[in-house]
Amino acid sequence: MSTALITGASSGIGAVYARRLAARGHDLVLVARATERMAALAAELHKAHEIAVEVLTADLTDAAQLQMVANRLRSGSPVEILVNNAGAALLGPFEAADPAAMEQLLKLNVTAPTLLASAAIGGMVKRGSGAIINLGSVVSFMPAFFPGIYSATKSYVLTFSQGLAAEVGPKGVYVQAVVPAATRTEIWERAGADLSKIPNLMGVEDLVDAALVGFDRREAVTIPPLSDLGLWEAFEGARAVLPSGLGAQPAERYRACASA
Ligand SMILES: NC(=O)c1ccc[n+]([C@@H]2O[C@H](COP(=O)([O-])OP(=O)(O)OC[C@H]3O[C@@H](n4cnc5c(N)ncnc54)[C@H](OP(=O)(O)O)[C@@H]3O)[C@@H](O)[C@H]2O)c1
């Protein structure tokens, strides 16, 4: 069976991906900082499913450790599924945000998934097969309701996924953006939020199981909490026709301003 590499596999969504992909018979590479948690999960999944499980301890905000994970994607047994799941939230307004904390968030939520996809993509295109799953968030649709840069990092993930899908889909590589709403994991408490105050929390197993239904259907974008698919299709439809409205001259409404 093929190998799946999952970042952020020590808890939450990543740990459930590990369980589900193990049950499907994939060998696993688990990546996160918490070695003991991953070792316990690896032992359990190896025993239950007779799969091989590697544990890679890495802080993905550290360039050398990120490179070590990228090296694993480029060599060793081929990785057929990359789950770019590791991520964190940063709460509070932009004007109060610590620049160092924002830099760490950008490294984890933006740089790491980009460079890991880059490391994986060459082999996948060469083999004409493979899949990359990137974890976005519905807050990228509602940036005005989520202060700070977390929503922008997840907008990047969605745009990156859709652009990459258009590029490598015809070469046999499947790219899926998974877009959860609030899900019951450690992410909110790690960011200092009170979980009891967050409404409509989805169970983490429900989230991953739904995302895998979308994966099996080869959906480009899977939004598990969205009941009315028509809303997303209208949103994407509007974007699809926008380029036909773009001209080489500034739009009429800006010409008066320019000459004033
Ligand atoms: N839960 C939600 O409501 C929700 C909603 C939308 C999107 N998401 C996205 O879902 C993804 C998974 O989050 P989750 O909800 O499952 O949260 P979680 O339980 O806090 O899991 C985050 C994972 O990322 C790992 N991680 C954090 N910082 C890391 C670092 N510097 N280097 C390497 N690994 C690191 C953590 O492991 P270690 O601490 O062991 O490193 C952990 O395994 C994230 O991308 C998140 O943005 C979550």
Image (cartoon, rainbow, N blue to C red):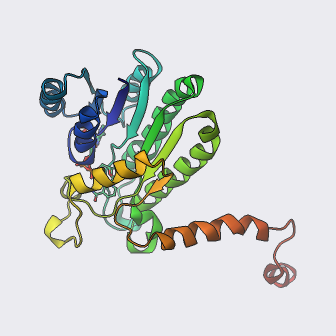
Which image quarter is the N terminus in? top left
Q: How many numbered tags mark residues here? A: 0
- On the image, the x and y values in percent for residue 38 come to 18, 31
- On the image, the x and y values in percent for residue 120 come to 49, 28
Please give left or right for residue 99 compared with residue 236 in the image.
left
**Residue 100 seen in this snapshot:** no
Residue at left offset 78%, top offset 67%: 244
- In the orientation shown, which residue stands out farthest toward the top? 76
Q: Quadrant of residue 191?
A: bottom left
Q: Quadrant of residue 64?
A: top left
Q: Nearer the viewer, residue 229 or 5?
A: 229
Q: Nearer the viewer, residue 51 or 83?
A: 51
| 243 shown above or below 109 | below
Which image quarter is the C terminus in? bottom right
Residue at left offset 36%, top offset 30%: 4
Residue at left offset 41%, top offset 34%: 82
| 88 shown above or below 116 | below
**Residue 14 seen in this snapshot:** yes
| 130 shown above or below 150 | above
Residue at left offset 32%, top offset 66%: 92
| 145 shown above or below 57 | below
- On the image, the x and y values in percent for residue 162 come to 56, 51
Please give left or right for residue 166 compared with residue 201 in the image.
right
- On the image, the x and y values in percent for residue 74 come to 47, 20
